[in-house]
Amino acid sequence: LFGAAGQADLPLTVVRPAYSFGPRFILSFMGRDGGRSMLARLRDGRPVLVPGDGTTLIHAGCAYDTGRMIAAVAGAPHAVGRDYTVGQRTFMTHDAYVQMFARAFGVTPQIVHIPTDVIVAVDAPEARRSLLHDLTRFNVAFSVKRFCADFPAFAWQWDLDEWAAHCVAWNAAQGLLPGRDETIFDDRLIAAWEERVAPLRAGV
């Protein structure tokens, strides 16, 4: 991109937004429903699937503040010819991500870990279409140090816990969270996993 812009004598700034969640879109690890099934399970005290051991990294951030970062970069003369990742200053583990939304409900999450390779190997369309194949099985975390160095006056307006609570409250107020009778592929995975590991636990 920079090579083509240079040949055409055009100013170019590249901006890469990290994962930024908001009221209308929250990422879960398997589904593509805007995270609403995950939120409903947290609300109801039901098990929540976290692939792997929970230590995979996710660069979650506030969509409102990410938008403000893009606005700061847009048109800034000193940003021309530079590229930036924009998002939260820090990243977190998958377990910490689920715990953040659980705090919005005032609950302790029932996290179930299933090895990622086991889920990927499941011969089911839900597994093949899941975000796990494309995205959430990988560490997705980046540095915003370049942005911070070039825009030192920028201040994030939202604490992530407060933003998560805001997004949860908005979805609840809109009646968008599924009821307790909803079942998803995660439930089948958890049930099958627990059925198979229970005898091992008993043997230990």
Image (cartoon, grey):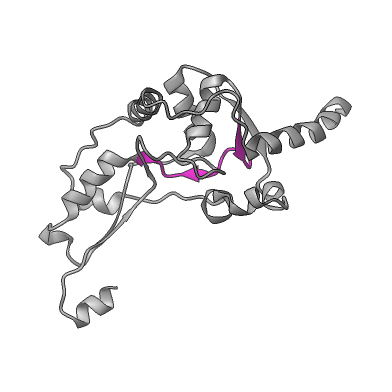
- The answer to whether 18 is drawn above or below residue 177 in the figure is below
- Horizontal side of residue 117 vs 59, given as left or right: right
Residue 14 appears at what percent x and percent y?
Answer: 27, 62
- Is residue 32 or residue 155 the one in the foreground? 32
- Horizontal side of residue 15 vs 132, given as left or right: left
Tell me the quarter of the picture where residue 52 sits.
Answer: top right
- The answer to whether 30 is drawn above or below residue 175 in the figure is below
Residue found at x 37% / y 38%: 24
Q: Would you say residue 49 sits in the magenta stretch?
A: yes
- The answer to whether 180 is drawn above or below residue 57 in the figure is above
- Is residue 80 or residue 109 the one in the foreground? 109
Q: Would you say residue 137 sits in the magenta stretch?
A: no
Residue found at x 70% / y 38%: 189
Quarter of the picture holding the N terminus = bottom left
Residue closest to the far bottom: 7
Tell me the quarter of the picture where residue 63 sits.
Answer: top left
Count how many numbered circles sit on residues in the image.
0
Residue 125 appears at what percent x and percent y?
Answer: 65, 52
Quarter of the picture holding the C terminus = top right
Residue found at x 51% / y 21%: 43
Residue 71 appears at what percent x and percent y?
Answer: 18, 49
Q: Which residues are magenta?
A: 48-61
Residue closest to the far top: 106
- The answer to whether 172 is drawn above or below residue 81 in the figure is above
Residue 84 appears at what percent x and percent y?
Answer: 28, 57
- Is residue 95 or residue 192 the one in the foreground? 192
Residue found at x 39% / y 47%: 19
